Amino acid sequence: MSKLSSVFFLKDRLEAMNPTIELLKSHRSIRKFKDQQIPRELFEELIRAGQSAATSNHVQAYSIIHVVNPENRRKIAELAGGQPYVANSSDFLVFCADMKRAMEAAERAGAEVTRGMTEQLLVATIDTALMAQNVAIASESEGLGLCYIGGIRNNPQDVSEILKLPEHVYPVFGMCLGYPDQNPEVKPRLPLSAILKEDAYTDADDTALVTRFDQTMNQYYQARSSSNKDTTWSEQLKPLFTSKLRPHIKAFLNGRGFGTK
Amino acid sequence: MSKLSSVFFLKDRLEAMNPTIELLKSHRSIRKFKDQQIPRELFEELIRAGQSAATSNHVQAYSIIHVVNPENRRKIAELAGGQPYVANSSDFLVFCADMKRAMEAAERAGAEVTRGMTEQLLVATIDTALMAQNVAIASESEGLGLCYIGGIRNNPQDVSEILKLPEHVYPVFGMCLGYPDQNPEVKPRLPLSAILKEDAYTDADDTALVTRFDQTMNQYYQARSSSNKDTTWSEQLKPLFTSKLRPHIKAFLNGRGFGTK
């Protein structure tokens, strides 16, 4: 594909975007799935595609728990704030940041290991996210749909107990995977100029940019095919910054052996 | 692509992997680039593909600093531990977790904002990583190569000053982008069974799995086309767990307004 595209002139290439970029730009969360199972061979292929993502110093600081037990899926659906698709998508995955495997390997090789470094929390969290995003894209390239489930951090201790997670492993987010049974619109994103800056951070235009983006989102929320509402981006963000949003995370991570130092 | 593939039988589909999964599985870091500039239109398209990644509650908690100033690129190349490709790739990006924009938007909309929650650190770090991985895949789909630069966390305070990052913004990692001038092998990954677990975390087989993977990596390191060495995965991991690896990260993040609560 890349070889082919390089013989096009840029203008042609951008008008006829390459199929991978087209796929990336068509992402939207899917929360309603057909009653159709992902074949095991394909499922494994998606996870392998995930493993191919870049990993900090090759540490591969992640594990995926494939939650198959229906009772556990129902429990996690509740713990995540009542998200029924956690229970009824084809597959439900919990992506865990996992420093245990690598730390023990290094220890067996003779390293004097220091546990709990905040740098290790970052490495494992980033590794996990890069890998999960590859799984997401591989899935979408096969016509599957997905949604990330940050809600498992509502009750991370309970989720960890259900999944029998040991110390130095924590559940970062879940992912529902399956064949889409809905076709929601692609949600607008901030204008490029809001997030891309040259040489130095500036936000002189942010208030104006956000005001315009609030209008864009208001139109989107009013016009979309389901769950219409009269709201804006800024309004929707408000609950994210209250002290009530997952105030337990610091103590939870520390208890798991992450970020104490 | 997905429509086409769905008419194949699974076996045929897996034998002839779809081009996106093939692309994902062919990833390797590129550290040597041609002296050839990425056209601006294409560059912007890559960033837009990045923005299309899933984002927690639509917060889009990231900013990208496109470092163009050659002197700043040289400085950051040094600060990142002497990585010359930071200075001489076509483009160098610093991906920043950015809670400032959304927090101020929520505040203008009347929210009583609580700063410093560790949950916000996770959300912004994950959002940034998902977005960056989309930029990486979009780039590779256009025949570009890249490497992530975690080394900017060696001296994150200096990097933040060069980029004039305000509070509630921190540099997560960098990325060098350009046209590859090398063709390194794909690095092996842990076997699927090491990272994919059903219903509960188990690591009973890990010691044996890691021993075999150490052999795999030893063969890879001895046989690869450059920087051959006689080492293993476990040996290579040792420096990651010393107390000397970025011990400043906790204080740095706290000073930026991340993870104090």
Image (cartoon, coloured by chain):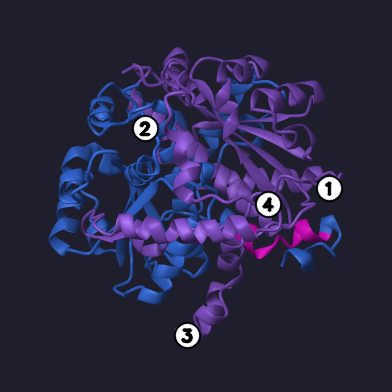
Chain colours: A blue, B purple
- Would you call the spot at circle 1 few (<14 residues within 10 Å), some (14-19), or many (20 or more)? few
| Residue drawn at (56%, 21%) of the image | B156
Is A19 covered by the magenta stretch? yes
Q: Amino acid at mark 1?
A: Lys
Chain under label 1? B
Pointers 1 and 2 in contact (C-beta within 8 Å): no
User: How far is disc 1 from disc 2 in space, using C-alphas?
Assistant: 40 Å
Mark 3 / mark 4, whichever is N-terminal: 3
Q: Amino acid at mark 2?
A: Val
Quadrant in which residue B153 is drawn: top right
Residue A150 screen position, x and y as percent:
33, 43
Mark 1 secondary-structure assignment: loop
Circle 4 chain: B
Taking the image as drawn, is residue B63 in sight?
no
Confirm or deny contact between disc 4 and disc 1 (CB under 8 A): no
Span highlighted in magenta in the image: A12-22
Numbered circle sitting on residue A113: 2
> Disc 3 is attached to a residue of which chain?
B
Residue A165 drawn at (x, y percent) = 22, 46
Q: Which residue is mark 3?
A: B11
Residue sitting at x 39%, y 57%: B211
Q: Looking at the image, is mark 3 or mark 1 earlier in the sequence?
A: 3
Q: Where does label 1 land, which residue?
A: B34
User: Would you say the magenta stretch is mainly helix, strand or loop?
Assistant: helix
Q: Position of residue B230 (x, y in %)?
A: 57, 51
User: Which residue is nearer to you in this view: B85 or B116?
Assistant: B85
